[in-house]
Amino acid sequence: MGAEDGEVYILRPDEGIDTDDEEAWMTPQPASDVIIEEIGEEVGGDSSSVESLDEYVDLDDLAAVFDGDEEAITFEVEGHDVTVTEAGEITVDDD
């Protein structure tokens, strides 16, 4: 899950799967895609202004969260505070 190859991955349930199902399939998804998508949803579907996540957060710091070294990380993207937790939860708040 580290950033050695330039990408960090988040394990998330497959689309349409009951997230309460302990046996649900989890799919690794690029963290940058997932986080940018969440930002887009928060700002009305427009994530085009966010080109590359590594312009806003050090990918090694983000990887440390998923490796269990940190519980969460918060960084600013286009006027929004983005928090990513070890569990893969992403929240986007207005700054």
Image (spheres, grey):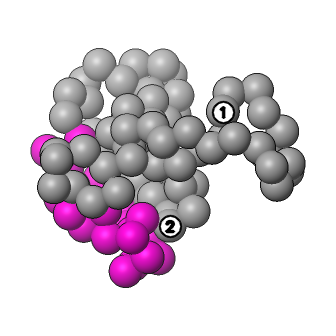
Residue 86: image tag: 2
Mark 2 or 1: the one toward you: 1
Residue drawn at x 20%, y 63% is: 60
Task: Examine the structure image and report whether residue 39 is included in the region drawn in magenta.
Answer: no
User: Mark 1 = which residue?
Assistant: 14
First of labels 2, 1 by sequence position: 1
- Image side of residue 12 versus residue 61, left or right: right
The residue sitting at 16% across, 45% down in the picture is 6
Q: Residue at x 25, y 30 (%)?
A: 50
Residue 58: x %, y % from top left: 17, 59
Residue 62 seen in the figure: no
Q: Is residue 91 left or right of residue 8?
A: right
Q: How many marks?
A: 2
Disc 2 crowd rating (10 Å Cα; few below 14, some 14-19, many 20+) is some
Q: What amino acid is at disc 1? A: Asp
Residue with the most extreme bottom position: 69
State which quadrant residue 3 falls in: bottom left
Work out which quarter of the rendered image holds the N terminus and state it.
Answer: bottom left
Q: CA distance from mark 2 to mark 1?
A: 18 Å
